[in-house]
Amino acid sequence: MSTIAAIKERFNNLDHDLRRLLIIACCLTAVLITAYVMIFGHLKKLEIRKASREQTLTEMMILKQRHREASVAASRLTNRLTAVTTEDTPALLIEQSGINIRGGIQSKPLPRAEQDGLIEDGAEITLNGLTSNELVNLLHRLEQHQKPVVIRRFNAKTNFDDPSRIDLIISLSLLRAAAEGR
């Protein structure tokens, strides 16, 4: 006799109430195992969803910070653009920087260029007889100026007459709002 046939014969020899109780116990065990597997599957899905949402949240926080920084930079540029008046020129900004230029300033206007709602009012400015300290101070003051200034080209070479001095040729553009420039 095989094992399965022996189990069937023993099962059939049991009392009717005991057989029913055994069947109910087996069904209950199968239901509990199925519920256990389904609950753990659902918990695994929830854990994956939680990890995904946490990752999305961290990305959103990074994007929120970048947006805040971009908003501050944009408002700073807007404030700087509103500070520009119609009388401002790149040469005037260099004169107002407070640096004493012994050799004088020569300025040649460059054609206006409009790009992305901004008008670039440019000039090629020649400064003669600067010390290296004055050159560094001038560049720092142009960078930190309250009006938006862009350096397009920069050429510094030693002065022929006095090698301790520097002759500077700089292409400087002053940015204006397009609505103001028209």
Image (spheres, rainbow, N blue to C red):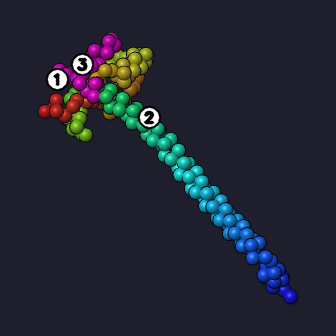
User: Residue 83: x, y in percent?
Assistant: 24, 21
Residue tagged by mark 1? 86
**Gap between marks 1 and 3 measured at Cα:** 12 Å
Q: Residue, x 22% and y 27% (percent of image)?
A: 108
Residue type at numbered disc 3: Leu
Check the image and report above or below for 26 versus 144.
below
Q: Which residue does the image show at 56% across and 52% down from the upper left?
A: 46
- Residue 169 appearing in the image: no
Separation of marks 1 and 2 at Cα, in angstroms: 36 Å
Q: Circle 3 sits in a helix, a strand or a loop, which is it?
A: helix
Q: What is the x, y in percent for residue 27?
A: 68, 69
Q: Find the magenta span and give its range.
A: 78-104
Query: Seen from this angle, which residue lies furthest bottom?
Result: 1
Residue 33 on image: x %, y %: 68, 63
What residue did someone put label 2 on?
65
| In this rendering, position of residue 47 left or right of residue 7 | left
**Residue 92 marker:** 3
Residue 145, labelled with which disc? none
